[in-house]
Image: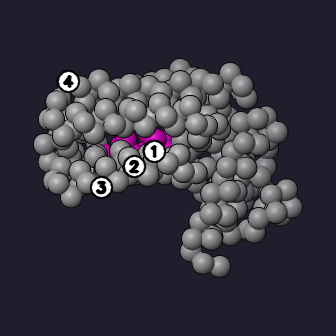
Amino acid sequence: MSGKKSLLKSLAAYEKIREMILSGAKLPGTRLVLTDLEKELDIGRGPIREALLRLDRSGIVKNIPYKGAIVANHPKFEEIVSIFEMRVNLEVKMAVDAMHQLDQKQVEKLEKLHEEMNSLTPEFYCLDRSFHDTIYKASRYNHLYMIVQKLIQMIEAYLNMHRQKKDNCILFNQDHSNILEAIKNKDEARLMSELETNIGRGLEQIKETYANFI
């Protein structure tokens, strides 16, 4: 199996298992048995194992020695709000520093990513993460970057399952356009405001997930 095909199968397994958990089809404490998931998802064990590891990193699944994977308890919504508050503080700090470090080649990469997202591609979420990562990696706060990556992993699985619907993508794209313009103009105040708005949209999507599925 090619690397790309394996990755696509793993992502498909991740989305399907995640949906079963957030919809209540798989309740907290339920064992996620590989043979059962193979039949339910019609996907091989390799991609399913990778999906379960990713879900474990996000906290939605726990891999317990000698017991296997089980569905974890859902975090309190107040915890998720706190995670987003921490993200705003850290990501704004990194973005402002990165704004003064980004070179022309990196700015062009941001422009290309933004252009790809404007096509409303199915890979929108991955491109969104690449857009933000390109900015944060340019900052001089390497340890803060690692902390933010962990915080994102903790809430990634709870992002709205309809995050790629057209209206949401259009709003995110406008945010990215504003962020990019602020970076080019070296406008710290606007960059801080636009980034806070953009991160806040993710929290609104999680609110929708909780309202509909939990």
Q: Tell me the magenta residue range.
A: 145-155
Closest to the observer, 160 or 121: 121
Determine which residue is flagged by label 1: 118
Q: The N terminus lies in which quarter of the figure?
A: bottom right
Q: Nearer the viewer, mark 4 or mark 3?
A: 3
What amino acid type is highlighted by mark number 2? Answer: Glu
Closest to the observer, 163 or 118: 118
Q: Secondary structure at mark 1?
A: helix
What amino acid type is highlighted by mark number 4? Answer: Ala
Determine which residue is flagged by label 4: 189
Give the mark nearest the N terminus, 4 or 3. 3
Q: Secondary structure at mark 3?
A: helix
Magenta region's main secondary structure? Answer: helix
Q: Nearer the viewer, mark 3 or mark 1?
A: 1
Would you place residue 171 above or below residue 211 in this image? Answer: below
Q: CA distance from mark 3 to mark 1?
A: 14 Å
Q: For residue 68, what is the image quadrant?
A: bottom right
Q: CA distance from mark 4 to mark 1?
A: 25 Å
